[in-house]
Amino acid sequence: MKAGTLIVALTVAGAVAALALWPRGRDVDVVTAARAPLTQSVVATGRIATPARISIGSPLAATVLEITVREGDLVAPGQVLARLRSDDAAALIAQAAAALTEAEARFEQTVQVGRPVAAQQLAQAEANLKVAQAEAERARQLVAQGFYARSKADDALRNAANAASAVDTARAQLLAQAPGGTEHNATRARVEQARAQLANAKARAAQLTLTAPAAGTVLTRKAEPGDVASAGKVLLEIADAGETRIHATVDEKNLRLLATGQKARGVADAFPNQAFDAELYYLAPAVDPLRGTVEIRFRVARPPAFLRPDMTVSVETVTGHKDSTLVLPAEAVREPASAKPWVLLATDGIARRSDVSLGLAGIGRVEILNGIGEGDQAILPAAGALDGDKVRIREPRKPKIGGIQVPQGFTR
């Protein structure tokens, strides 16, 4: 009896030891593949950009008399923004006016005095020429008769030549004074030049009243009445009231997902509950080599009133959508960026590797095109299970409050 009892005891002890050494299986957490709607998108952060910034400055050194607008004011084309005063401008106008008066007096002198005087000088020169020619002919005859020496005839001929030259000079002077002549045209050009200088001086003085070149919003006011503004100093900056745009950057790996014309949703950090529509219209032709990013731009057709220049916004560009498809949480897919992504399935208590093909990638979820079926359970990597391991599925844990953070107004 004791021997039989001993044999039974040894058998029981051996069985207990064998059970202790037999693998119990690894406890794992799983997620179930299910059909659901999925939206793929690219989220970028950027800033509101105005089409143009207009700098309003002083054309010359002047004193600020008045500035009629402040930051945030809406302005219309032609609206007076500021008034300046410049003593230099007044001096330039007076100087140009005096130069015009002098030029007009010289032109009048040319017409009223210069031309008649030139005509009289021509008539006198022609009369002197006739006398000199007659004297030369008389001297020639007297020399031929022997009454005068040859030198007397030479003097008379020289006097006649001088008189002829004087006639040519007087005729040239008269032609210069006549309409279309060089002197007439020169004095008239001086008048026109003086008028232009006066008009320019008045125009520069008129620029001391600064007006808005286009509709827009005042961004900055950099001067106050009494300030002395140097030439070129910016007094006001205005944002043109044109199309509202968003300039943002995305990682270059997202380039394959983006195309101009795609619809997007924007959310301002300051107003997270008020999303607005946008459209992708520009992809930069080059990649920033230092950051590995690409600049993208959106236009906002109907911007909400709260958008302001340089405001930070997040933009979600929808690059794909399916109303119903097989999806898994992204954390369940192993090596998703490789040529052969895979998942580890829990099948009849054994971990089995299964290669999969991926489709759309949403926020925290991916589309499974093939490799698993609806209802299959994928083991999460945190469990540390390997292909072929025995596994035991833990009871589902309560979902964490919060989970993946998705900006308000965006899809998931």
Image (tube, grey):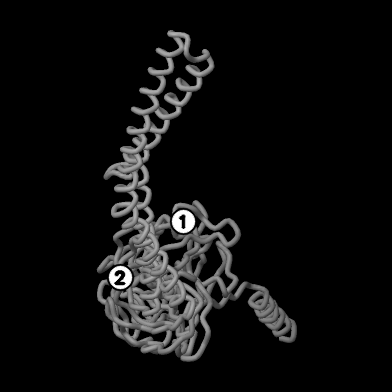
Going by the numbered disc 2, the residue's amino acid type is: Glu
Expressed as whole percent of the image width and height from the top left, the position of residue 204 reads 40, 71
Q: Residue at x 37, y 23 (%)?
A: 133
The residue positioned 41% from the left and 29% from the top of the image is 163
Give the class, few, some or many, for how many residues have Cα within 10 Å of label 2's Cα (few <14, many ≥20): some
Relative height, residue 400 to residue 314 (above, below)? below
Residue at 33% over, 67% down: 318
Which quadrant of the structure image shows residue 324?
bottom left
Which residue is at the front of the view, 217 or 380?
A: 217
Give the camera-side residue of 61 and 186: 186
Q: Is residue 54 visible?
A: no
| Helix, strand or loop for disc 1 | strand
Find the residue positioned furthest to the front. 147
Where is residue 37 shown, x and y percent of the image? 29, 71
Indicate the secondary structure of the residue bearing disc 2. Answer: loop
Q: Which disc number belongs to residue 243? A: 2
Residue 370 versus residue 393: which sits nearer the camera? 370
Q: Which image quarter is the C terminus in?
A: bottom left
Cα gap from disc 2 to disc 1, whole angstroms: 48 Å
Viewer can see residue 208: yes
Q: Residue at x 46, y 58 (%)?
A: 354
Q: Is residue 276 left or right of residue 26?
A: left
Q: Which mark is residue 132?
A: none
Residue 355: mark: 1
The percent position of residue 280, horizontal first and vertical second, equals: 34, 64
Q: Is residue 388 above or below residue 308?
A: above
The three-letter amino acid code for the residue at tag 1 is Asp
**Place of residue 70 in the rendered image (x, y in percent of width and height, measured from the top left):** 39, 89
